[in-house]
């Protein structure tokens, strides 16, 4: 059998059902629990925290929606079932050839930052724990084929370490962390304050996921003045794509702070940010490193920054065709993962998935294609080998 028929999707999201927290939190938290409400206009929104923010559900589940953003499903009933239902997700995975999918949140934030809006540390922790419990329940139809990524109460390092251990025992396979804790009044990511997190990740052999948009990006994405000056659609494109490049800037902080040389077993995954920029960042950091005297100030650097990136940083590609074909040698063929970002507005969806795979990887040697599309993620996340070949998206014989 050819495992290359299947691929592993290193970044997808779940559109959380409305009872994730109301069905799990203790009674004392029910009044303040995040909840989905339907407006008089029939729009489902998340009521999350004392700030009164209302997050439309449809914005997280645009896959298959016939009109471009800002049009979106009004409510969960109009979203694709695979966005929120595990059985439907498995059927969709079979149709596109995804053997396994990594699962990231929506409502809690791409770095768990939305929980800060609850303004109650006890409630914040309870909500993170409830989400992590729910995610393990959600994958129960076939845990082999899902890669659960835990939410992290990063505002409390001791609680975060405890939760990392708890989640590892439950079956979580990666740790979601914010790339920019300083955006929330906390120490920069390279501060020793965070050392217990890196220690726990290494002790438990869990990679750290730095997903795009895990800092405070609201002004970058939803700036009314930019909408007025440039238009809604153009601003949507430029601002959402700029968040991808923000990961590049934040990764420079990670590398130059010395986190990687001080923690040689730490594995960082730059999620949803692409790979085309990686050679430039490596070359730029190496250039600066050579003249700035970094070794004098930080003797833990026994090699150049790019060497640590090559060994300890994985990156995800999804829409790129030029990038994957040109950066493999520089980034490392064993450090690139493939993703679709399902079911977000810019995701690869349906037949587009295999078309993109063919366009980006079709001319690569089979052993290279297998690494990028399957083996790299399987090794990183300890994913079991498929128990059957992919049938090309055809319904099973007994369907």
Image (cartoon, rainbow, N blue to C red):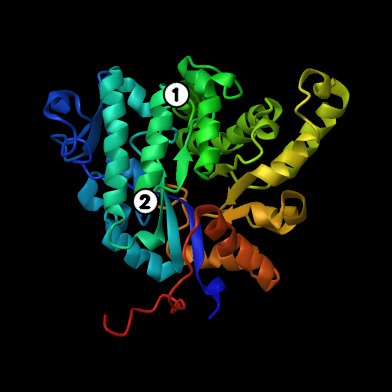
Q: Residue at x 24, y 52 (%)?
A: 78
Q: Residue at x 48, y 37 (%)?
A: 236
The numbered mark at residue 116 is none
Residue 304, position in %: x, y? 80, 35
Q: Quadrant of residue 349?
A: bottom left
Tell whether 298 sits left or right of 372. Answer: right
Tell whether 295 sits left or right of 385. Answer: right
* Residue situated furthest top in the rendering: 185
Tell whether 241 sits left or right of 364. Answer: left
Q: Quadrant of residue 326?
A: bottom right
Q: Report whether residue 10 is seen.
A: yes
Asked if 116 appears above or below 173 in the picture, the reply is above
Circle 1 residues within 10 Å: few <14, some 14–19, many ≥20: some
Asked if 168 appears above or below 333 in the picture, the reply is above
Tell me the CA gap for discs 2 and 1: 43 Å
Q: Report whether residue 212 is seen.
A: no
Which comes sooner in the sequence, label 2 or label 1? 2
Residue 378, position in %: x, y? 53, 60
Nearer the observer: mark 2 or 1; the answer is 1
Q: Quadrant of residue 263?
A: top right
Q: Which residue is mark 1?
A: 157
Q: Residue at x 54, y 17 (%)?
A: 187
Give the structural element (helix, strand or loop) at label 2. loop
Q: Residue at x 44, y 66 (%)?
A: 99
Q: Which residue is mark 2?
A: 67
Q: How many marks?
A: 2
Give the structural element (helix, strand or loop) at label 1. helix
Residue 165, position in %: x, y? 41, 38
């Amino acid at each position: 059998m050819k495992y290359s028929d299947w691929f592993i999707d290193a970044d997808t999201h779940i559109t959380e059902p409305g009872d994730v927290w109301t069905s799990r939190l203790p009674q004392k938290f029910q009044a303040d629990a995040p909840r989905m409400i339907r407006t008089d206009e029939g729009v489902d929104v998340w009521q999350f925290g004392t700030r009164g923010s209302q997050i439309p559900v449809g914005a997280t589940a645009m896959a298959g929606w016939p009109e471009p953003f800002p049009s979106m499903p009004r409510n969960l009933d109009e979203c694709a079932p695979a966005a929120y239902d595990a059985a439907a997700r498995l059927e969709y995975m079979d149709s596109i050839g995804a053997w396994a999918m990594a699962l990231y949140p929506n409502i809690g934030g791409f770095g768990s930052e939305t929980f800060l809006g609850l303004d109650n540390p006890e409630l914040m922790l309870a909500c993170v724990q409830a989400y992590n419990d729910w995610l393990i329940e959600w994958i129960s139809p076939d845990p082999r084929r899902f890669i659960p990524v835990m939410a992290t109460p990063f505002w409390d390092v001791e609680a975060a370490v405890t939760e990392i251990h708890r989640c590892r025992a439950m079956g979580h396979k990666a740790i979601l962390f914010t790339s920019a804790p300083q955006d929330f009044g906390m120490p920069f990511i390279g501060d020793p304050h965070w050392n217990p997190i890196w220690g726990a990740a290494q002790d438990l052999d869990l990679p750290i996921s730095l997903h795009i948009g895990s800092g405070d990006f609201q002004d970058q994405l939803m700036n009314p003045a930019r909408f007025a000056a440039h238009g809604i659609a153009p601003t949507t494109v430029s601002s959402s794509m700029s968040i991808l490049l923000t990961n590049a800037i934040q990764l420079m902080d990670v590398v130059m702070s010395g986190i990687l040389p001080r923690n040689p077993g730490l594995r960082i995954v730059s999620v949803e940010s692409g790979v085309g920029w990686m050679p430039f960042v490596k070359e730029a950091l190496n250039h600066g490193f050579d003249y700035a005297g970094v070794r004098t100030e930080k003797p833990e650097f026994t090699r150049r920054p790019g060497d640590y990136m090559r060994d300890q940083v994985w990156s995800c590609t999804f829409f790129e065709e030029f990038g994957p074909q040109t950066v493999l040698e520089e980034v490392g063929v064993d450090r690139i993962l493939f993703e679709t970002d399902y079911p977000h507005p810019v995701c690869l969806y349906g037949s587009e998935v295999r078309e993109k795979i063919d366009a980006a990887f079709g001319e690569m040697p089979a052993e290279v294609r297998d690494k990028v599309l399957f083996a790299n993620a399987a090794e990183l996340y300890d994913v079991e080998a498929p128990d059957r070949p992919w049938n090309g998206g055809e319904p099973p014989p007994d369907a």
